[in-house]
């Protein structure tokens, strides 16, 4: 009788040990994937990480967005959602930005589970109550990839059907990989600041999308179609989905609803060294504000916008960022020292630190890469 009791207790213990070993092996593989981030683009990195995460954390759908590190607004999405949900993408994005429960802008460093945040009553989440509940989603695990230089993205894993909510062990694994993945995402963004070639696409003129208050596309300038095709490559034969435009427009709605105060703008990498800035604003005056259409503009990021992103991506200090801001005006070291109230020797020390962090050898190269010239 005692032997039977001991065997019964050993079975769950053995399962627990096996799970722990699986998590450790997966953690090691995540580290290796992130260590190779310098040779991967952000999309490929996310795809490889998702394939690895799936080995130990089961999920039925996901949404992983890169974000503007300053505004935390989504810019470059990678998603796999139920096909029936695709026609409701604008609604999904709008509700995501208006939902305060487990909003990525307020989450701490650990992974957050919707089942925990709502005490098991998922209807307390606007997104679940209005949309996800109708598609059989039973839990959402959320991870935010943020460091002291900004927010670089967020990941939502959806679980549906009889699988049940995510477990504490799964949440702990997601929390463990967060810092390593954050650094890899930031490194990928830094890698976009390469020497500009003559083949870089240039903006032919105003690129504007007009969206309804519900984020349906009402119209767009001719150039918008082609730029969206590059920003969000569609499946063969399909029209490009303006996911970046949905995100900045949804952020505008969140600001108007006092859910979040960040500007309705996001910078997104287009190709080679080219970055674009998306902004959303209401237009017209006749209707009440919440009934006016939303214009989303897409234009090449300004030198100041690029410089700020460059400094964050390479992890420059506030002083180093300030120094680059002075250098971009064309002044010499002596004048920089005077304006920053530093000695010329200290300015040179800051420059050496910048060269070390960016792996660039001189100020001309640093400024060329940062400004995209």
Image: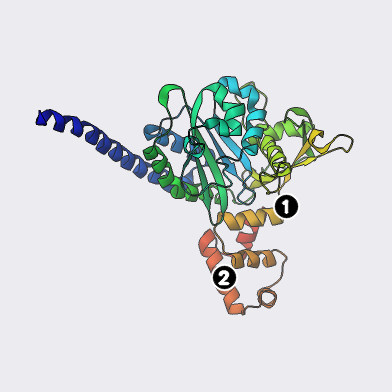
Label count reads: 2
Q: Position of residue 3 (x, y in %)?
A: 10, 30
Depth check: give the residue in front, 170 or 61. Answer: 170
Tell me, for residue 302, which label it has, or none: 1
Residue shown at 56% from the left, 56% from the top: 149
User: Coloring scheme of the render?
Assistant: rainbow
Give the crowd class for mark 1: few <14, some 14-19, many >=20 residues within 10 Å.
Answer: few
Residue shown at 51% from the left, 32% from the top: 121
Q: Which residue is mark 2?
A: 350
The answer for how far apart the CA atoms under marks 2 and 1 are is: 24 Å
Tell me, for residue 117, which label it has, or none: none
Q: Position of residue 16 (x, y in %)?
A: 27, 36
Q: Is residue 351 above or below residue 298?
A: below
Residue shown at 60% from the left, 26% from the top: 131
The answer to whether the residues at label 2 and label 1 have Cβ atoms under 8 Å apart is no
Residue shown at 68% from the left, 49% from the top: 261
Q: Check the picture and name the quadrant holding the N terminus.
A: top left
């Amino acid at each position: 009788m005692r032997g039977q009791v001991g065997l019964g207790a050993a079975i769950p213990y053995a399962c627990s040990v096996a799970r722990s070993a699986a998590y450790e092996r997966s953690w090691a593989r995540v580290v290796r994937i992130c260590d190779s981030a310098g040779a991967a683009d952000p999309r490929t990195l996310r795809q490889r990480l998702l394939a690895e995460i799936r080995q130990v954390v089961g999920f039925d759908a996901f949404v992983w967005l890169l974000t503007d590190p300053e505004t935390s607004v989504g810019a470059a999405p990678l998603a796999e959602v139920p096909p029936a949900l695709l026609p409701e993408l604008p609604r999904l994005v709008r509700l995501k930005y208006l939902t305060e429960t487990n909003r990525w802008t307020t989450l701490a460093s650990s992974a957050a589970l919707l089942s925990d945040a709502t005490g098991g009553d998922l209807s307390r989440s606007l997104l679940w109550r209005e949309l996800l509940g109708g598609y059989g989603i039973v839990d959402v695990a959320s991870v935010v990839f943020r460091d002291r230089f900004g927010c670089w993205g967020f990941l939502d894993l959806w679980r549906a059907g009889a699988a049940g909510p995510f477990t504490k062990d799964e949440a702990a694994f997601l929390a463990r990989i967060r810092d390593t993945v954050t650094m890899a995402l930031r490194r990928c963004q830094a890698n976009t600041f390469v020497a500009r070639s003559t083949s870089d696409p240039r903006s032919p003129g105003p690129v504007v999308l007009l969206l309804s208050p519900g984020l349906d596309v009402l119209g767009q300038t001719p150039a918008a179609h082609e730029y969206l095709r590059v920003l969000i490559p569609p499946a063969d034969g399909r029209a490009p989905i303006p996911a970046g435009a949905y995100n900045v427009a949804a952020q505008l709605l969140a600001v108007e609803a006092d859910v979040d105060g960040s500007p309705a703008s996001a910078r997104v990498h287009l190709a080679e060294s080219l970055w674009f800035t998306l902004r959303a604003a209401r237009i017209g005056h006749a209707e009440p504000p919440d009934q006016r259409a939303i214009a989303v503009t897409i234009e090449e990021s300004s030198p100041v916008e690029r410089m700020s992103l460059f400094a964050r991506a390479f992890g420059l200090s506030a002083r180093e960022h300030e120094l680059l801001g002075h250098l971009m005006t064309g002044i010499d070291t002596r004048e920089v020292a005077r304006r920053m109230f530093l000695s010329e020797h200290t300015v040179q020390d800051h420059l050496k630190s910048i060269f070390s962090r960016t792996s660039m050898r001189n100020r001309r190269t640093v400024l060329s890469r940062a400004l995209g010239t």
